[in-house]
């Protein structure tokens, strides 16, 4: 999703801004631009596509100036071309924007009537003209920005710069995040602390409804009524070392391989392996007295939550209501007073997930945030932060964050089951032991990379793929399909194996590979029947199972991928790895942009 960087500095800022934008690349974007002020004049370079194109433009036509704003754009209104790329200008005003101005059509009509001409199809351009109109009517820059902001409806983070003041940037936040970075005689604005990490670790996060006047030596935050407000200045934990692929081709590959380690860190945070018990840290509720829990999330995080539902319900006998956040937020779900709500999010900034959280906040129930970015908005608005210790995830397609989300949910399910007395101390010890072995199982799963690479070569020749699974392997089948379509652009669907005969079986022919996720568990035989239905219709089966499953499958497969024998409880965490590798290598064979697939964003700050 769009990224913002702004600097009121002391040396030429254009290269610094592009460097910071590179650190926001992981959010996903399709064009980029930078503007500066030099000797009272605005200058701008923009380019469609990746930042290398912008870099090239700047090399051919450098931009001077010690104040500037930059942007990576993920298109919402208007195609991703140079004209729609930010910054947008209007009579001495330059603007970058992340989010959606919902009343832009009405504002555009009004501005057109006043003679303002629009050069782009974006919603953003109205903001530039609104500020310019205020200036033309005699307002000083800060007042012009404030008056314009008051007219805006929707979700936005903005940075506004003026040709007449080379020591002023106005920032604003209503929805998407924006942080002020404090330097020595220079100040920064950025969509997150990672972007600003090379410049400063001293950060102030704006809250919704805040706007800020930033100058090289000072900053002041206001609310929409123009009252001064104080926000805490904090040391960010973000560091600049993370934008490094090591010796891997892609961040996604590196992140897949980091999983044994980060899963181990995450589990150790929640479980006492020595005692064989869930750690008794403070929670803002007691699992024993809950009658249900609500979970909401988007994308891969939602599928992690769905697996969590199976665990909470089976082991803790605790019913779970779960929905994708874009539905959850609007469908007026009744929230039990005896419940707790969990929001799962890698970025901690996903707009729909945040809105669901606020819905539950109004319902007055305790809120837990399972997030990877601890300084995120979702973390800050929750009663308890339950961190995934995956480290920064840069590949747009989530991998290690997913398995760490599963690790947190599994540990919480153990804690809930223990608190509710639905498992015995012996069972708790056995479950904790199973979890403690996951990093080792994950390491063994990674050793299948060579075989999976070969299977992926075959998969890359097809246009459609079906994934099947039962129980926790059903959400995992959906995750496998999501991963494949996200990065290889091959159409894929994940189905409950038992639902096959209610529709998708009509699709089965020689051109439809079917990936079956089926460890030898309680219901393995049921899945074998479904595989037989596929085989009878010429479908090509790729079976992901264990030794016993491979021996008992009794169907011809195109390929059988054999994972280590793992306890049923932890299987979805371990089986996630071959699923991710299949998607990864298929995408590599397809030649797609694995880390930044087309049209996708890492941090989805609009609904
Ligand atoms: C985007 C990403 C997905 C992610 C989803 C939710 O669609 O591309 O990988 O699962 O957002 O993001 P979150 O940061 O809330 O986990």
Image: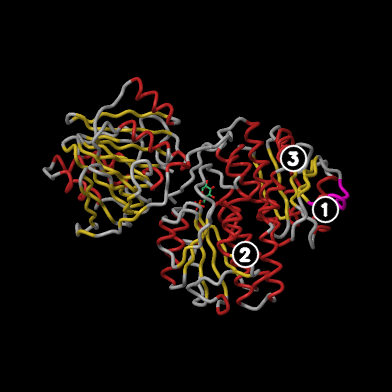
Expressed as whole percent of the image width and height from the top left, the position of residue 127 reads: 27, 43
Expressed as whole percent of the image width and height from the top left, the position of residue 36 reads: 26, 32
Expressed as whole percent of the image width and height from the top left, the position of residue 424 reads: 70, 76
Asked if the beta carbon under badge 1 is closer than 8 A to the nearest atom of ligand 1, the reply is: no
Residue 66 falls inside the magenta stretch: no
Mark 3–mark 1 CB contact (< 8 Å): no
Q: Is residue 20 left or right of residue 147?
A: right
Q: Is residue 401 left or right of residue 224?
A: right
Q: Give above or below for 67 relative to 550.
A: above
Closer to the camera in the image, 159 or 532: 159
Q: Quadrant of the N terminus?
A: top left
Q: Which residue is mark 2?
A: 309
Secondary structure mostly seen in magenta is helix
Q: Residue at x 74, y 40 (%)?
A: 512
Q: How many marks?
A: 3
Q: Give above or below for 496 relative to 67.
A: below
Q: Residue at x 19, y 37 (%)?
A: 166
Which residue range is magenta in the image? 546-555
Of mark 1 and mark 2, the one earlier in the sequence is: 2
Callout 2 environment at 10 Å: few (<14), some (14 to 19), or many (20+)?
Answer: many
Q: From the image, state whether disc 3 or disc 1 is nearer to you.
A: 1
Query: SS of the residue at dot 1?
Result: helix
Q: From the image, state whether disc 3 or disc 2 is nearer to you.
A: 2
Of mark 3 and mark 2, the one earlier in the sequence is: 2
Task: Choose top left, top right, bottom left or bottom right for residue 77.
Answer: top left
Q: Which residue is mark 3?
A: 512
| Mark 3 and mark 1: Cα distance apart in space | 22 Å
Q: Which residue is mark 1?
A: 549
Which residue occupies the extreme top position in the image?
60
């Amino acid at each position: 999703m769009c990224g913002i960087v702004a600097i009121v500095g002391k040396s030429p800022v254009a290269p610094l801004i592009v460097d910071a934008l590179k650190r926001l690349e992981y959010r996903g974007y399709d064009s980029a631009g930078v503007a500066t002020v030099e000797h009272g004049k605005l200058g701008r370079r923009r380019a469609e596509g990746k930042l290398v194109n912008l870099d090239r433009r700047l090399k051919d036509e450098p931009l001077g100036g010690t104040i500037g704003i930059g942007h990576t754009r993920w298109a919402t209104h208007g195609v991703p071309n140079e004209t729609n790329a930010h910054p947008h200008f209007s009579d001495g005003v330059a603007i970058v924007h992340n989010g959606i101005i919902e009343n832009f059509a009405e504002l555009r009509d009004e501005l057109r009537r006043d003679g303002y001409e629009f050069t782009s199809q974006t919603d953003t351009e109205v903001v530039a003209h609104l500020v310019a109109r205020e200036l033309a009517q005699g307002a000083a820059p800060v007042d012009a920005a404030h008056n314009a902001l008051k007219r805006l409806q929707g979700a936005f983070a903005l940075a506004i710069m003026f040709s007449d003041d080379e020591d002023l940037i106005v920032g604003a936040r209503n929805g998407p995040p924006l942080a002020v970075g404090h330097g020595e005689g220079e100040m920064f604005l950025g969509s997150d602390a990672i972007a600003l990490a090379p410049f400063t670790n001293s950060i102030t996060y704006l809250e919704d409804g805040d706007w800020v006047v930033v100058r090289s030596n000072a900053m002041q935050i206001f609310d929409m009524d123009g009252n001064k407000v104080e926000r805490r200045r904090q040391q960010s934990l973000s560091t600049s070392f993370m934008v490094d692929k090591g010796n891997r081709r892609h961040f996604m590959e590196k992140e897949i391989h980091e999983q044994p380690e980060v899963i181990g860190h995450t589990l150790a945070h929640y479980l006492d392996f020595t005692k064989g018990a869930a750690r008794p840290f403070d929670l803002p509720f007691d699992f024993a007295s809950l009658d249900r829990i609500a979970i909401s999330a988007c994308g891969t995080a939602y599928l992690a939550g769905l697996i969590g539902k199976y665990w909470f319900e089976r082991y803790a006998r605790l019913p779970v209501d779960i929905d994708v956040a874009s539905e959850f937020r609007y469908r007026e779900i009744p929230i039990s007073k005896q419940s707790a709500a969990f929001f799962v999010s890698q970025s901690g900034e996903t707009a729909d997930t945040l809105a669901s959280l606020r819905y539950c906040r109004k319902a007055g129930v305790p809120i837990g945030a399972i997030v990877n970015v601890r300084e995120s908005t979702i973390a800050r608005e929750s009663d308890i932060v339950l961190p995934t210790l995956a480290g920064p995830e840069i590949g747009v397609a989530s991998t290690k964050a997913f398995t760490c989300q599963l690790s947190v949910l599994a540990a919480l399910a153990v804690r809930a089951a223990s608190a509710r007395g639905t498992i015995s101390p012996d069972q708790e010890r056995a479950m904790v032991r199973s979890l403690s072995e996951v990093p080792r199982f994950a390491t063994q799963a990674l050793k299948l990379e060579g075989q999976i690479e070969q299977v992926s070569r075959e998969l890359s020749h097809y246009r459609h793929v079906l994934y099947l699974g039962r129980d926790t392997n059903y959400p995992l089948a959906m995750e496998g399909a999501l991963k494949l379509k996200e990065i290889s652009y091959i159409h894929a669907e994940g189905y409950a194996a038992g639902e096959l005969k209610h529709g998708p079986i009509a699709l089965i022919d020689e051109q439809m590979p079917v990936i079956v996720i089926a460890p030898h568990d309680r219901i393995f035989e049921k899945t074998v029947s479904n595989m037989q239905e596929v085989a009878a219709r010429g479908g090509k089966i790729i079976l992901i199972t264990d030794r016993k499953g491979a021996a008992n499958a009794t169907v011809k497969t195109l390929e059988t991928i054999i994972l280590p024998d793992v306890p049923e409880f932890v299987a979805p965490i371990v089986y996630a790895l071959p699923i991710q590798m299949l998607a990864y290598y298929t995408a590599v064979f397809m030649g797609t942009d694995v880390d930044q697939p087309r049209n996708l964003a890492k941090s989805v700050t609009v609904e």
